[in-house]
Image (cartoon, grey):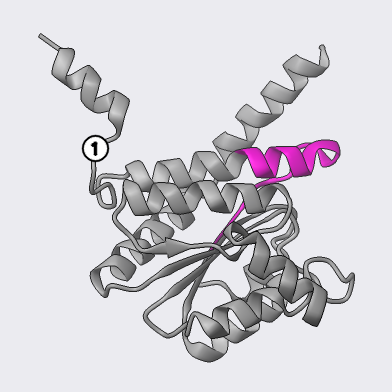
Amino acid sequence: MSYVEAYLKDAAAILGRLDVATIQKIVDLLVALRARHGRLFFLGVGGSAGNASHAVNDFRKIAGIEAYTPTDNVSELTARVNDDGWASVFVRWLEVSRLGDRDMVFVFSVGGGDLERNVSPNLVEALRYARDKGATICGVVGRDGGYTAKVADACLIVPTVNPATVTSHTESIQPIVWHLLVSHPALQASPMKWESISRSLSP
């Protein structure tokens, strides 16, 4: 089997093993968030930061939920890293945003945060703060879910099928999941462009 065939086979296996009940719980929590006019804050680093930015667009435009991510503001992000350090960058941003119990923090991460291994300590500190403030916590993470899985109200763990591709598969599954969320009938508030064009062209 070629690498391409094996990679796609593993991706299909991962999709088949995703926990449907957890995804539905995330849907329900997002529906409740919108109903109480709460805000949605996405946190991620590396490739997951790019995913967070894309998700902000989709949740605002398609689901009608007020959404933000700190990594969209590179000036503030780098200023905080430079002046205060990496570990506190997200928690300080959430403090200024006045995170409260109406809001949700949504994590995209491969490891989910692990202080003992000094992996994504900024996620851990932000989630500790979110818990203290009574905010809802959700996540789509890989491996064993790390700290995110321990404290989240709903956390989808992307199953590890091949340890050699855990990062690429986890960061690839995250967009599939959030696109599922924003297109879910319970959450989609606005039509998507190409689907609406297709419907208008149908006889």
**Which residue shows up at 17% across the image and 13% down it?**
201
**Which residue shows up at 31% across the image and 24% down it?**
194
Q: Quadrant of residue 73?
A: bottom right
Q: Which image quarter is the C terminus in? A: top left
Q: Which kind of residue does numbered mark 1 sit on?
A: Pro
Q: Residue furthest bottom?
A: 132
Q: Residue furthest right?
A: 117
Please state if 49 lies on the left or on the right of 201 as rendered: right
From the image, tell me which residue sits under label 1: 191
Rendered view: 109 above or below 117: above
> Residue 99: x percent and y percent?
48, 82
**Which residue shows up at 68% across the image and 22% down it?**
8
Q: In terms of depth relative to the viewer, which is nearer, 155 or 80?
A: 80
Q: In terms of depth relative to the viewer, which is nearer, 162 or 4?
A: 4
Q: Which image quarter is the N terminus in? A: top right
Q: In terms of depth relative to the viewer, which is nearer, 175 or 164?
A: 175
Please state if 132 lies on the left or on the right of 91 as rendered: left
> Residue 9: x percent and y percent?
68, 23
Rendered view: 69 above or below 143: below
> Residue 192: x percent and y percent?
29, 34
- Inspect the magenta stretch and tell me whether residue 159 lies in it: yes
Rendered view: 25 above or below 187: below
Residues in magenta, as a range: 155-172
Q: Quadrant of residue 147?
A: bottom right
Please state if 41 lies on the left or on the right of 48 as rendered: left
